[in-house]
Image: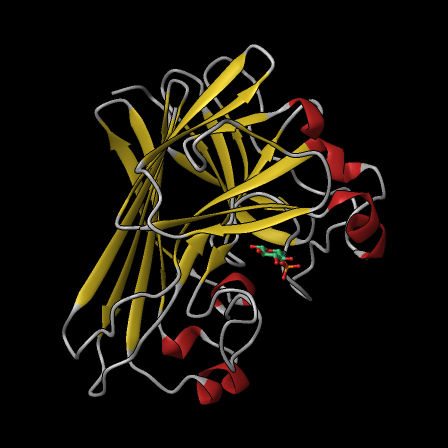
Amino acid sequence: MPHMDAAISTTFGQLPALLLTAPDGAQATITLYGAHLISWQGADGRERLFCSTQSSLDGSRAIRGGVPVIFPQFAARGEGMRHGFARVSTWRVLETGFDDGWAFAVFALAPADLAPDHAAAWPHGFALSLRVAIRANELSMRFDVQNTGTDAFPFAAALHTYYLVDEVADVRILGVEPEELAITDKFDHVYEGVAPRLALVDGGVVLTLRQEGFTDAVVWNPGAQDAAALADMADEEYRRFVCIEPALLNGPTLQPGEGWRGEYHVS
Ligand SMILES: O=P(O)(O)OC[C@H]1O[C@@H](O)[C@H](O)[C@@H](O)[C@@H]1O
């Protein structure tokens, strides 16, 4: 075992965060606000995630970039807050360590962690955990939802991943449509019942995206016009990312004691 810690405390903007480092040099930064993976660099030193230069980084609103955790509602598909409270709540660190060359951290969120108005608006007993692990040029995320309460609840979930790209118009996404998908303008599409293996091709760089438990995928880019209207994104920044999000849009209704797991593996 190398003489270093898998995780050290740091800050990102004004937000407390963990810096994970694998023995091979792969690194990731995760803020406790949202259990939000902000930066992921493979052992090759290349950053894979986009984060807006205009993002709030003080806990006053969701971070624009990285991997927002979406729970218990996707976008405006429901009466709760847009994309749910998980991305604007402060999670706890449960565990960090090494496992077979991986550096990992596990974060947890339960009702007692929520702002009172969020807890009152979604009054269910639940326990969330998010495990983030890195090794070589691979990222592995595992999201668990447990019903710890006495009533059943339906939910939606997603890992709203903002991939950093050279130029969005040159990107191709494989596996969501019969032909390869190119993003030529504003794009916002939900693919229900998607293949478990997708690919993102950005010039010579190919990322393989594998999801389990998440049955759906969402592809989003705001295009020039919507990006200009987003206060937390610079006008030209829409060119530097595409969101490909493993999602569970019509999740099962979880009975008391039941759980659900979604996994996401990027390499
Ligand atoms: O601005 P937000 O709340 O982070 O949402 C960003 C986008 O998230 C995507 O997942 C949705 O499909 C889009 O419709 C939405 O615009």
> Above or below — where is 198 with respect to 244?
above
Q: As rendered, which of 111 and 14 lies closer to the eye?
A: 111
Q: As rendered, which of 68 and 179 lies closer to the eye?
A: 179
Q: Is residue 255 left or right of residue 118?
A: left
Q: Is residue 115 left or right of residue 242?
A: left
Residue 137, percent from left and from top: 41, 19
Q: Which residue appears farthest toward the top when viewing the image? A: 204
Residue 101, percent from left and from top: 27, 22
Determine the residue positioned at 14% across, 74% down: 257
Q: Which of the colour schemes (rainbow, by chain, secondary structure, one colour) is used?
A: secondary structure
Q: As rendered, which of 134 and 243 lies closer to the eye?
A: 243
Q: Which residue appears farthest toward the left when viewing the image? A: 257
* Position of the C terminus by quadrant: top left
Determine the residue positioned at 46% across, 38% down: 8
Q: Is residue 163 left or right of residue 240?
A: left
> Above or below — where is 65 with respect to 90?
above
Q: Quadrant of residue 183?
A: top right
Determine the residue positioned at 27% across, 31% down: 98
Query: How many discs appear?
Result: 0
Q: Quadrant of residue 261?
A: bottom left
Residue 13, percent from left and from top: 69, 48
Q: As rendered, which of 11 and 111 lies closer to the eye?
A: 111
Residue 241, percent from left and from top: 65, 35
* Position of the N terminus by quadrant: top left
> Above or below — where is 146 with respect to 11?
below
Tell which quarter ligand 1 is in. bottom right
